[in-house]
Amino acid sequence: MYDVAVIGGGPVGSHVAYKLAGMGYEVAVLEQKERLGSKVCCTGIIGQECVRSFAVADNLILRRVNRATLFSPSGEVLRLGQQETQACVLDRAAFDTTMARCAQDKGAKYVFNSPVKNLEVSNDKVRIQTLRQEEGLDFDARVVVIASGFNSRLVEGLGMGRISHFVVGAQAEVETVALDELEIYFGEEIAPGFFAWLVPTSPLKARAGLLSRHSPGLYLKRLMASLVAQGKIVSAEAELSYGGIPLKPLARTYYNRRLVVGTAAGQVKPTTGGGIYYGLLCADIAANTLHQALNSNDLSARGLANYEREWKKKLGQELKMGYRIRKFYEHLNDRQIDKLFNTIKANGMADSLLKDSNVSFDWHSSGLLKILGTVAVSKVIQAVKIPFRLRNRG
């Protein structure tokens, strides 16, 4: 009988395990992969706030970013830059394995190649049924934490709902030609309703990817062909990886003897799809809630409710506003996006935001709402004729 079973050995699951094992609890981490560090569809960009808050070591950082170039549908260019580092690109394989190793050093037990088949919640425990090398292997725990990624069937099977608002990301590792800064591309022919990226990782290497509600692989192949034609990457031939990204959180992230954390819970930035920092913040909250609940032996829904209260207090407003801004952007056509680019450039809004100490890489809604609230951009929004409820609420 373990105190806690964590399903999913990614950074969020490993951080929950690290915290709880460090408090003296018996923790098992069940991971369906044979090993950590295999390919994931993640750009791996985190802000400096995340680096500082979770003491991310220098050897896990491939590149530090302080400049980005944004391209409108018509090719209009908007350059953003500061002297100080604004974000870091992680070596995701090394990051994942390091997070797991830290948890193991605290005493957490990792069981690999063990996809979870079923969860049975009773009055005094959770039974976790896994498949390992085609044979059943069961685990019992006082409480379970689901940190197994997007749209886990386990969540829906436990009656906790499902994420219906999502987008699919596609990404490939590519060889570049002297790429020095992050590039972001907008347009209906590139990534309709979303955006694409080219992120340098190491000398002459980068991650090319995009988000789309449909046919992300097709759009990414077109993007890479265009980048080859522009002389930015060497070849459009690359293996693509895919991943679902929630745009809204689950309606409920706790119940009797179970919590849902990270991407599985929808704790992801709706504006960019970034989930590492928010997931780690919620992992801290989950661990603290479970510490109190395990100590008092109250693992009922009532005993675990503080988890959702606290993470919503931390992230709830940011996620709501980010989603409304995301929906606004999805209504724009290429002409309107170009108009916004030109308005932002002509009024020096980007430089103004970069100098604003209240605007952060990890908290997007404040800066975006400042842009949307200016007189110049308001005129563009009125011309777009977005439904009033979206304009009125951000």
Image: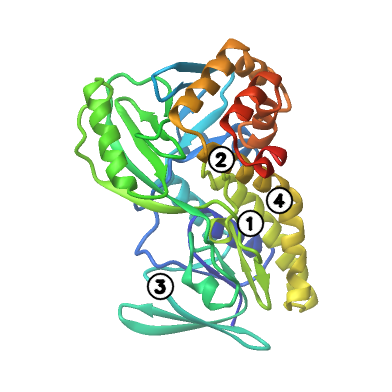
Q: Which residue is mark 2?
A: 271
Q: In the rendering, at what x and y percent does residue 293 appear?
A: 76, 72
From the top left corner, tell me how far across and down residue 91 is, in percent: 42, 40
The reply to whether callout 4 and callout 1 are in contact (CB within 8 Å) is no
The answer to whether the residue labelled 2 contacts the one labelled 1, judged by CB atoms less than 8 Å apart, is: no
Q: Is residue 299 visible?
A: yes
Question: Which amino acid does the dot numbered 2 rest on?
Answer: Thr
Q: Are marks 2 and 3 in contact (CB under 8 Å)?
A: no
Distance CA(mark 4)–CA(mark 1): 15 Å
Residue annotated with mark 1: 283
Q: Earlier in the sequence, mark 2 or mark 3?
A: 3
Reading the image, the residue beneath label 4 is 316
First in sequence, mark 4 or 1: give its number: 1
Give the crowd class for mark 3: few <14, some 14-19, many >=20 residues within 10 Å.
Answer: some
Examine the image and state in which quarter residue 133 appears. bottom left
For badge 3, the amino acid type reads: Pro
- Residue at the image position 40 percent from the left and 67 percent from the top: 32
In the rendered view of the protein, which quadrant contains the N terminus?
A: bottom right
Task: List x then y, in percent, for residue 86.
Answer: 57, 26
Relative to 328, 182 lies left or right: left
Residue 73 position by quadrant: top left
What residue type is disc 1 on?
Ala
Tell me which residue sits at (56%, 14%) in the image: 345
* First reached walking from the N terminus: tag 1 or tag 3: 3
Q: CA distance from mark 1 to mark 3?
A: 21 Å
Tell me which numbered mark, 4 or 2, is placed earlier along the sequence: 2
Would you place residue 293 above or below residue 19 in this image?
below
Callout 2: SS: loop
Of marks 2 and 1, which one's residue comes earlier in the chain? Answer: 2
